[in-house]
Image: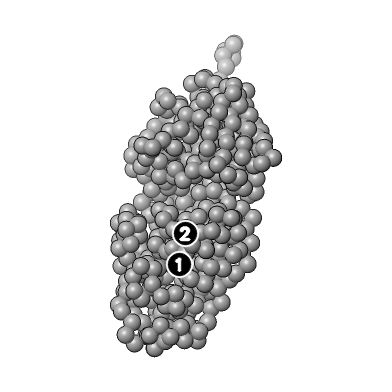
Amino acid sequence: MAACGRREAVPAAPEKILRISQRNEPATLDPQLATLPDEFFIIRALNEGLLTPNPDGGVPLPGAAERWEVSPDGLTYTFHLRANANWSNGDPIIAHHFAEMIHRVTAPDSLAPKAHLFAMVQEVKTPNPEILLIVLKQPTLDFPAIVASGPWIPTHEKPGVGNGPFILTEWKPNQHISVRKNPLYWDAVAVKLDGIQFLASDSGDSEERAFRADQVDVTMAVPFTKLAGYRTAQPPVLHTVPLHETRYLALNTTRPPLDDPRVRRALALVLDRAALVEKVTLSGQPAFNFVPAGLGGYAPATLITENADEARRLLAEAGFPGGRGFPKLELSAWPVSPAQLEALQQMWLRELGIGIAIAQREARTHLAALATGDYAIAFMTAIPDYDGASDLFTQLTGGHFANYPHWRNADYDRLVAAANWPAAEKILLGEMPLIPLYFNAQNFLVSPRVKNWRTDRLWTRFYQGVSVAR
């Protein structure tokens, strides 16, 4: 006789935890102190700014602010905060939180590495808890995009409290970082995941092996040596996103003979960018200008025309016919695929008769040398902080901390201040303080179980709407 009233236990549904490979251990999760895309991958899961980047590019989307207006003179922005936006501990999000963040970054003793993204702010007002007024020093067309950038994300005074779609639950350095869904997030209904695990991985090879072993759902990259195989055998799991990221060579314009524009142009015009991309990197697009087309709607008007004969003529005119007498220079880089450095080295030797040595250094050492000018030619990458052409153009103005060529041109600075991008880039490509090589692309693997994974051209990830089947 069957037992009455007894009910079989229903197994709990498996949690929807997304496992993402994390290449670099975050030095901080403070938005005002962070610098790496890897840090902002996690920061954007935990916190949200007034505005957020648009996955499709263009005008940013509302975030903690549900709408905003700008005055006719372009100087005053009024942000209206959401009435239903709260921190994960239940505290309401008010205008004061954003005002304090701005004051913190712009204070004289600020340590914020991206403080320049707040330099246009003249005054901040909070007429009531739900309205934030920001008065600018001068009209700034890219200001909404700047507000949507990572350094404009706020933090709560209490550690572990955020206003984003997830809450930090565990951080084991060099192992994993775990986050759980934030039920108090204003758009919690759009968050389909129960949590995310950011799993530390020390190389592209190790994360690719973890993906094949079903230990990771989304990788950071794919080793160059594995790209062709995935393109042929498993195209559905291979994702490629063209980036607004320029790989280029910084030329130390304070060091002879690189202080001569003719030498710099010769080094630039002799390179075969199509061959570099098609035969060496196997990814990306050749770059014949510095600022990517489409960044903030930018359309380049001047392009580099590769011409080996013209390069040899310029080098001879500068006093080095056939490369004779050209000093031994060094091409330095952080640890990247040596093949692309060697390809550049061979092009210069073959076409110009000059020998360039190669040196790879730890990333921090490489960047320190660029900042102090202790280098000759340096492999570098330019990643904009926001979806606007003004960012990259401004980086090459006189005295800017990211002006690694240590180049100064008053006419260029004037044109950048006037937002005359086409004329500014014409000067840039004429003087050639840097050599654009290619616009990078992110190649990564996504498990078929993951749906609606989105990432933009600025390395931003969008977690709302993402789901994973377990």
Q: Position of residue 20 (x, y in %)?
A: 47, 44
- Kindly identify which residue carries mark 2: 396
Q: Which tag is nearer the camera, tag 1 or tag 2?
A: 2
How many marks on residues? 2
Q: Label 2 amino acid? A: Leu
Nearest the viewer among 281 and 406 is 406
Please tell me which residue is depicted at 47% across the width and 64% down the height of the picture: 409
Q: 354 above or below 337?
A: below
Please tell me which residue is depicted at 63% across the width and 67% down the height of the picture: 301
Position of 32 compared to 237: left or right?
Answer: left
Position of 126 compared to 382: left or right?
Answer: right
Q: Position of residue 430 (x, y in %)?
A: 52, 72
- Kindly identify which residue carries mark 1: 434
- Neighbourhood count class around disc 2 (C-alpha, 10 Å): few under 14, some 14–19, many 20 upward: many
Q: Secondary structure at mark 2?
A: loop
Q: Label 1 amino acid? A: Leu
- Neighbourhood count class around disc 1 (C-alpha, 10 Å): few under 14, some 14–19, many 20 upward: many
Nearest the viewer among 83 and 42 is 83
Q: 468 above or below 368?
A: above
Q: Quadrant of the N terminus?
A: top right
Q: Which mark is residue 138?
A: none
Q: Tell me, yes or no, whether the two marked residues, 1 and 2, touch with CB atoms within 8 Å.
A: yes
Labels 1 and 2: the sequence-earlier one: 2
Q: 113 above or below 238?
A: above
Q: Quadrant of residue 420?
A: bottom right
